[in-house]
Amino acid sequence: MAMSPHAPAENPSTPSGYGFELVVQHTLERVRGDTSGELAGYIPELARVDPERFGISVVSVEGEVVSAGDAEVPFTIQSISKAFAFCLALEIAGRDKVLSRVGVEPSGDAFNAIVFDPHTNRPFNPMVNAGAITVSGLIAEELGADAFPMVLDRFSAAAGRSLSVDEAVYSSEAATGHRNRGIAHLLTSAGALVADVDATLDLYFRQCSILVTASDLARMGATLANIGENPLTGSAAFSVEAVRATLAVMFTCGMYNFAGNWAFDVGVPAKSGVGGGILGVVNRQLGIATYSPRLDAKGNSVRGIAAFRELAEELGLHLFDPTNRGSAMLTAFGR
Ligand code: GLN
């Protein structure tokens, strides 16, 4: 049985007394003062964003939306695209073919590590760059010139509006992404990448440069939480089986070499990107997104992690938390 929400506050310092909107607002305010971390500098264009931006958005599978701060400021999706591209690849290429090219094991290594599973000679998982480039290669192999239009179409269906690419970020990464280029050539020599290297990287850099806001990402997360169907538009973006597989890999690998700590403390499938976004999914309940571009040494948003920790604690969102009242609270407050 879902717990009933708290009654309106007697004590204004207790955010849980106020309802969902104030939980989100208070989380933003409590975390805002942390200005530690650095902008992602290795893609030159990403170092030009305003470091102060901070937004949180939550969307339920019933279609309720609660946002605070800079939830409508666009930024590039970066590695959060890896989760949705994997979801699409499973549907297009089929599970067996996908799993013959990329594993589903946490690597414990940095997102851009040049390391493959020594037993299979395949990338460890689709959430690190090597695995994500493999997945983009599979989509390119299956769809040719239709690959990026299909990616953009599905991401847009999940967000519930037409998304576009930040051409400046795309060009910046295409011009400087030598490490990813190196990874792609190694993947080709290992047999994990069959499609043309240039076509694969073009797709990968473009998908990473798709512009989203925190509220777009929260809707995309709510689409995953709603087993592939956007709860606000009713349009189906992803297949049910692919969503289950994607959430599982997000849970074990989505935060790179921080995935274990994240599963321990926050406990929801999630994916971060060096653009400053983090997307979390409370299965069958909520999509939650944060945007704050200062990153820690592992490439995860500092304030994003802190905000998710607070929300998970406040709302009991952890997968194994018996007091989970996230969407029940949101619904009960009539948002
Ligand atoms: N486009 C970035 C890269 O490949 C994405 C990395 C990330 O968001 N962690 O380097």
Image (tube, grey):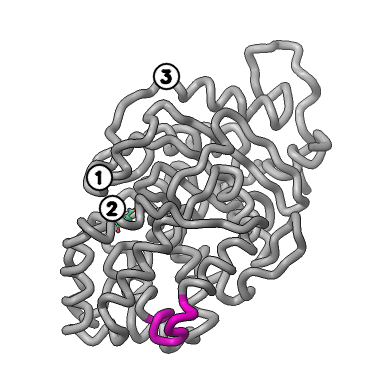
Above or below 229: residue 118:
below
**Pointer 2 and pointer 1: residues touching (CB < 8 Å)?**
yes
Q: In terms of secondary structure, where does tag 3 sit?
A: loop
Amino acid bearing label 1:
Pro
Distance from disc 3 to disc 1, alpha carbons, whole Å, reads 26 Å
In the image, what residue occupies the spot 61% across and 71% down? 238
Mark number for residue 33?
A: 3
Q: Relative to 234, is 68 above or below?
A: above
Check residue 277 for magenta coloring. no
N-terminal-most mark, 3 or 2: 3
> Looking at the image, is mark 2 or mark 1 earlier in the sequence?
1
* Rendering quarter of residue 303: top left
The type of residue carrying mark 3 is Gly
Q: For mark 1, give the secondary structure.
A: helix
Magenta stretch in the rendered image:
138-147
Residue located 32% across and 43% down the image: 46
Q: Which residue is mark 2?
A: 172
Q: Is 152 on the left-hand or right-hand side of 239?
A: left
Quarter where residue 224 is shown: bottom right
**Image point 76% across, 12% down: which residue?**
10
**Residue marked by disc 1:** 44
| Ligand 1 visible in quadrant | bottom left
Q: Position of residue 20 (x, y in %)?
A: 70, 32
Q: Residues within 10 Å of mark 3 (few under 14, many from 20)?
A: few
Q: Compared to 181, does 143 lie above or below? A: below
Q: Residue at x 63, y 52 (%)?
A: 219
